[in-house]
Image (spheres, grey):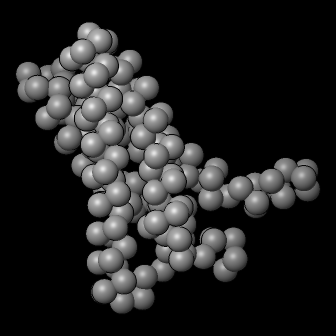
Amino acid sequence: MKQLKNLVTRYYSVLSYLFFGGLTTLINIVVFTVLNSTTGWNYQISNVIAWFLSVLFAYITNKRWVFNSKTTDTQAFVREVSSFFFFRILSLGFDVVIMWTGISLLSGNPLIVKIIDNVLIVVINYVFSKVFIFRNAKSILSK
């Protein structure tokens, strides 16, 4: 039991990122699927709306529970949120290309392509968050 606790402590940020990343992915897929199947909009419009809502959720959960970021002033908050959205816009570029390739070029099922897309994007976003966005945040376990 102690070994399990040590593993959880050691890999807390990765495990919490995967948990909240899973919820973020679920939000992204559900919103995309609902909009894509009910609105008649181009799948890329549904994809961008799903992206925005899931990124907003991801910022809140990453800031609070994954990287335990405690911005102390408005300037630090603006820098952090701007950085988060900037890197998520970069990953949106990957997202759009993956969706276009999978659906428009390869005629893949939109839901299957979206799931594959999300797995790749979660990995890209973790690297961006860990290396660039929340790099100065202290671990939640070191309170």
Task: Determine the image quadrant of residue 50.
Answer: top left
Left or right: 8 in relation to 22: right
**Residue 33 visible at all:** no
Left or right: 129 in relation to 108: right
As drawn, 33 above or below 129: above
Task: Determine the image quadrant of residue 32.
Answer: top left
Q: Residue furthest left?
A: 40
As drawn, 36 above or below 109: below
Left or right: 26 in relation to 74: right
**Residue 45 point in image, percent of width and height:** 14, 35
As drawn, 94 above or below 69: above
**Residue 66 point in image, percent of width and height:** 55, 61
Residue drawn at point x = 37 percent, y = 73 percent: 80
**Residue 125 visible at all:** yes
Q: How many marks?
A: 0
**Residue 15 point in image, percent of width and height:** 64, 50
Residue drawn at point x = 21 percent, y = 17 percent: 104
Q: Residue furthest right?
A: 2
Query: In this orientation, which residue lies closer to the viewer: 76 or 96?
Result: 96
Q: Residue furthest top?
A: 107
Residue drawn at point x = 44 percent, y = 50 percent: 125
Residue drawn at point x = 19 percent, y = 42 percent: 49
Give the position of the C terminus as an image quadrant: bottom right
**Residue 20 point in image, percent of width and height:** 50, 49
As drawn, 94 above or below 140: above
Query: In this orientation, which residue lies closer to the viewer: 94 or 1?
Result: 94
